[in-house]
Image: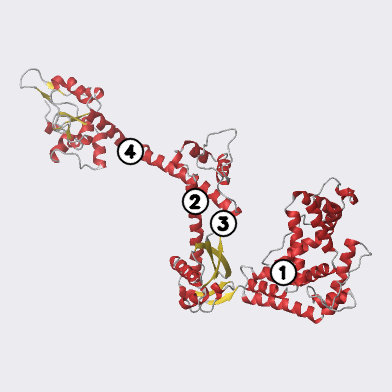
Amino acid sequence: MVMPAEISESATECDIGKILHLRSGSLRDLSREEKYCILSKDPNSDVSVYPRTRPYGSGAFRQFQPSWLAQFPWIHYSTFCDGVFCRACAIFAPKVVGGHTLGQFVTKPFKSWTNKTQKMKSHGKLDYHLTACAKMSEFLTAYQQPSHAVNVRLDSQAQKQVEANQCVIESLFKIVLLLGKQGLAFRGHRDDRIEWEEQGDHDNRGNFVELVRFRAETDETLLKHLQNAPKNARYTSKTIQNELISVVGKHIQSKILLEIEKAKYYSVLADELADVANKEQLSISFRYVYDRMVKEVFVDFVEVERITGKALAEAIIHSLTVWGLSLSHMRGQCFDGASNMAGARSGCSAILRQAAPLAVYHHCASHRLNLAVVSSCKIAAFRNTESYIGEMARFFHFSAKRQRLLDRAIDIVCPKAHAKKLKDSCKTRWIQHIDSYIVFLELLPAVHMTLEAMVSPDSFDDLGTDWNWVGETVMKANGFIHQLECSTFLASFKILLECLSCLRSLTMKLQMQAIDVIYAYKEVNRVLSSLKSMRSDATSRYSAIFKETTKLAKSLHGEDFELKQPRVSARQTHRDNVPASSAEEYMERTLN
């Protein structure tokens, strides 16, 4: 008989019986390496002869049989105890199950060789044993092949889901950026319920949703998300759209504010206006120098309840404080010339100056130029000319039928014209009237032909004779023809075109973001020199303009047409009533 003491010492290094003896009956605090040693290395490999014992002190001798390892692979023979443990339960089973402390196979060796089959089969069917075996299998897999472990696979699956969600969010953000860049509306009339199953036809759900559909055609990740994600996690609702817009806006705003902080010094540009909901909004922009470049950027709209100077100043100061910008670094403030903005005592600029003494107020240069032009155009003839040009533009704009007739006339009279429609002149920006004037001059022959065709359709077979114009249209067309035959109208138009042409470049450059004081000063001096040159040689310049006006009038009304001066009356008070020997002299005295 072989005694336990005769077993080699290497056979007991991973012996559960010995380890339990040394650790007071617990394997809970074993390290991963020690657990793996017990589970992977069987001490029975160094044992050739097993001890023989009598079960109850009498009868035949019994001993452990190695063949049992094949029948019950979870058993562990302890040479130290000459008994059998369950490798899985000894390490992974709980101490107490059903209110009973576990004994045989777990904390105590099994030595009853006579009824070993029944006992081992019974133990192999226990729930805690099956759970422990599963834990043992997972532990061995995780130790030997870490990438195949359940937790790693779960983590890997979770990571894949995170990456898929990130791809979906990235696609949605790109759509938001595209719509924002192009200035397009996001939502349609109804977008609360969106079905993403493939259908032959579906309602138009708005630009955002339709772009998501379009992108999903080539983006499998996005398509799977839309088809399989829960309805409350598709990220396409109007609430999520607003959140995406807000995230993009805050990101852009934070980058701008970071640049301003690095630039240190800045100027504030602000103006108030009412939105479509009739709420007062204060737009706030900044002008600063960053990386040797002058930048002028819009930052935010701030809703205000009142538009008094105090309320607007408080709104600006509050916004600067929230954005973390120091008022001591403000070096300029630029608003319009309204009393609530530019007032010397209670205006917004004056109140801001109290908080930021170095912030010098500047009235918007382009706005000041506009006011100067408006102030200089007090002559009734010029105001009437501007009004009639706008009326003609609206006459065609509000009627598709009239516009079609004008299109035919353009194809016949001036087919090489760049513009195809008249432009309505801006109500407040007189210096921007030049664009509408240039288009009006280019299309004037076609406009005159169209008006004549409305009054006398039988005289213009090329334009068609079946238009059947109503009396109101014919009446207005007659009135416009009368104005085109008016010498004062034609002369005023040519003078306006000549004078405002030299201001167009200055107007555009004063509104440039990167313009500086030196460049603006040079442009202003250039315009002043041009205007002084026109005034110093006013007679010859006017004579040239009058000749061009005469040429224009003859091209419209025939070579026999002559510009005439209005009738002069001694008691006339409703129009210019100056004596003159000719139409040219009359226009020079009344319009210059």
- According to the picture, the residue beneath numbered tag 4 turns out to be 142
Residue neighbourhood size for the residue with mark 4, other residues' Cα within 10 Å, grouped as few (<14), some (14–19), many (≥20): some
- The label shown at residue 242 is 2
SS state under label 3: loop
Of the image marks 2 and 1, the number of the one nearer the N terminus: 2
SS state under label 2: helix
Residue neighbourhood size for the residue with mark 1, other residues' Cα within 10 Å, grouped as few (<14), some (14–19), many (≥20): some
Please tell me whether mark 3 or mark 1 is closer to you in this view. 3
Of the image marks 4 and 1, the number of the one nearer the N terminus: 4
Q: Do the residues labelled 3 and 1 touch (CB within 8 Å)?
A: no
The span from disc 2 to disc 1 (Cα, nearest Å) is 40 Å
Q: Which colour scheme is used?
A: secondary structure
User: Residue flagged by tag 4: what amino acid is it?
Assistant: Ala
Furthest residue to the front? 571
User: Between residues 531 and 309, which one lies in front from this camera angle?
Assistant: 309
- According to the picture, the residue beneath numbered tag 3 turns out to be 276
Furthest residue to the bottom? 536
Of the image marks 3 and 1, the number of the one nearer the N terminus: 3
- According to the picture, the residue beneath numbered tag 1 turns out to be 504
SS state under label 4: helix
Dividing the image into 4 quarters, which one contains the N terminus?
top left
Residue 14 position in % (x across, y down) = 21, 36
